[in-house]
Every structure is written in C-alpha cells, then in structure tokens.
Image: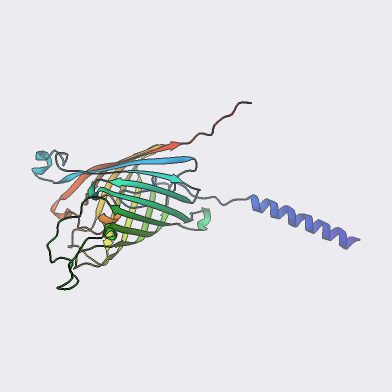
Amino acid sequence: MKNKILFSVSFFLFIFSTCVFSQMEKEYIYGTFRSRQLINTQTTEMLPVKSFDFTIRHRFGSMGLDSTAYQQFLGLDLPANIRFSFALPISKRLMIGAGRTKNGKTIDGEIKFLLFRQAEENNPPVNIALYFSPAITTGAFPLIPEYAYKPDSITPFRYRFSHRMAYNSQIIISRKFSEKFSAQIAGVLIYKNLVSPSEENQTLVVPVGLGYRTGINSSVLIEYAHRFNNRPRKNEYPIALAYEMGTVGHVFQIVFSSSQELIEQEIYTKNSFDYLKKKFCMGFNLRRTFWVKKKITHT
C-alpha cells in the first residue's frame, strides 16, 4: 500500500513538474538591431507577426570633399539609384520579400529564416539566420564587343535569359553585447550567371557590421565587406556609415556609402568608390512597418 501511495505521489510530482517546466520559456533577447537590414547588409532581425514592411533606399550620385560637393549639390544633381521593397512575415522565424531597383531595372525576391535567437544566460549566445535572394535584371543588355565572352575563336556569343540571373546566399551571425552595442558577421556567396572573362562567377564575401546606440531612439552604424576573390583595388571594398533614428514603426537612416548599388549582388561584385580619395555618395534608408489589426466582429 505504501509503495502504491509513494508511486502515485511520485507520478503526480513528475506530471506537475513536467507541466510547469514545459510552460517556462526561454528569455530571449530582442532588438539586436532596429531593422532587417543594417545599412546595405542583411541582419538577423525578423518582422513582427501580423505586420508587413515597406522600405525605400536611395543613393545620390558620387561626390568628394572638394568643389564637387557644392557644384553637384551633395550629389543630388547626379543620376541616383533607388529601391522599393516589401517584406512579410510567415511566422516568427520566417519572412519573405520582394523589391525593385532602378539600376539594371532589377527585380529581386528574398527569404530569411531565423535558426537561433540569442537568449539570456548565453543559451544560445548568438542569433543565426539564413538568407537567400534571387535577382533578375529586366533592362536591356549592354552592347559588347563582338569578341567579348567568346568561349573560342569560332563560337559567337549570344545573350541568354539565364544571363540576367544573380543569386545571394548568406549565413548571418549577430550578438547583442549590451543595451548599446551590437555586432554581426556574415558569410556571403554571390553567384552571377554572366561575368566578364577575367572574373569568376562566384564571389565570396564576409561583411562585418557594428551598431552603437547613442540615445533611446538613435544609433550610429558602420559596415565593411571584404571580398576573398574577384578582388577590387585596395581601397574599393564597400564600406558604409549611417546615423539612424527609429521608433516602433519607423526607421530612418542618413547614409554615407562608398557604393551607389543597393542589392548585394551588385554591391559585393562591383568596385566601390575610393574612399581614401574622399569619394562617396550620400543617401537615406526609410523603413515603415504597418500592423495588421484583427477584425472585430459584433455579435
């Protein structure tokens, strides 16, 4: 009898403890960065469920810290590049999006999946996300010399639809070290179906980003990307600096960038301006999050 009572009590305590611990959730850390994109690079941030995101990113023409700054009115008089994009969460860990960029008349899609979210007591200690983006240029192919891209001296080169495609695959790791300081690093593989004969189709890049909160609603951001092949000249790796102001539904950034490009398939494969010669472009990023309200039914 005593054994049955002891077994019953033990079983009850087991069931009770299981129910209690199953309801205990990890204390996750949120707000590593304010946006799903740092400046030009992706972050591990996801969109809140029951919302969608509209983003405008704009870069004016290149200028220097000389007479061109006022002659071209900070680059506003020169041809600019602009991108519009939408993003939608499927779940807390999955989001999709699409955008359109002026340069190349490029249309791109994107999908991001959050593998791990940083939690209290460093379990896990970092955020890890996977990102993939295919892009297609819809503008006219550039005119090329007749001999360019020829695989041999006989076969003529002809553009194909597949030459319009480029792909961006990433693994992104970030960590919020304190309420003010966050950092991230990513491994990026860009694959373009058409490149110049002197280049490889794939480009391996490692971008690094830092964010420091200067106030409740403001931050300073910086990012740099290093290419391991298809290397540019020494001072033409992409680098960007931004001052960010944000609220719950808005994020606005004033950007200084060494590249006018706005999608990573182009940022990481084209040479940037030589920033040591004080060449750069100004611009801005504007993000607006819209919330989907639950419809109230009256009975």
Left/right placement of residue 265 relative to residue 182 reads left
How far across and how far down the image is residue 195, in percent? 22, 63
Left/right placement of residue 37 relative to residue 152 reads right
Q: Is residue 27 visible?
A: yes
Residue extending farthest top: 298
Residue situated in front as seen by the camera: 197 or 11: 197
Give the image's coloring scheme: rainbow
Which residue lies at the image location 13% right of the left edge and 53% below the top edge? 277
How far across and how far down the image is residue 100, in percent? 30, 46
Q: Give the quadrant of residue 185.
A: bottom left
Residue extending farthest right: 1
Left/right placement of residue 24 relative to residue 97 reads right
Residue situated in front as seen by the camera: 153 or 283: 153
Give the position of the N terminus as an image quadrant.
bottom right
Q: Is residue 176 visible?
A: no
- Identify whether 54 is placed above or below 262: above
Left/right placement of residue 136 relative to residue 259 reads right
Give the position of the C terminus as an image quadrant.
top right
Which residue lies at the image location 76% right of the left edge and 55% below the top edge? 13
- Identify whether 208 is placed above or below 91: below
Which residue lies at the image location 21% right of the left edge and 67% below the top edge? 199
Residue situated in front as seen by the camera: 32 or 177: 32
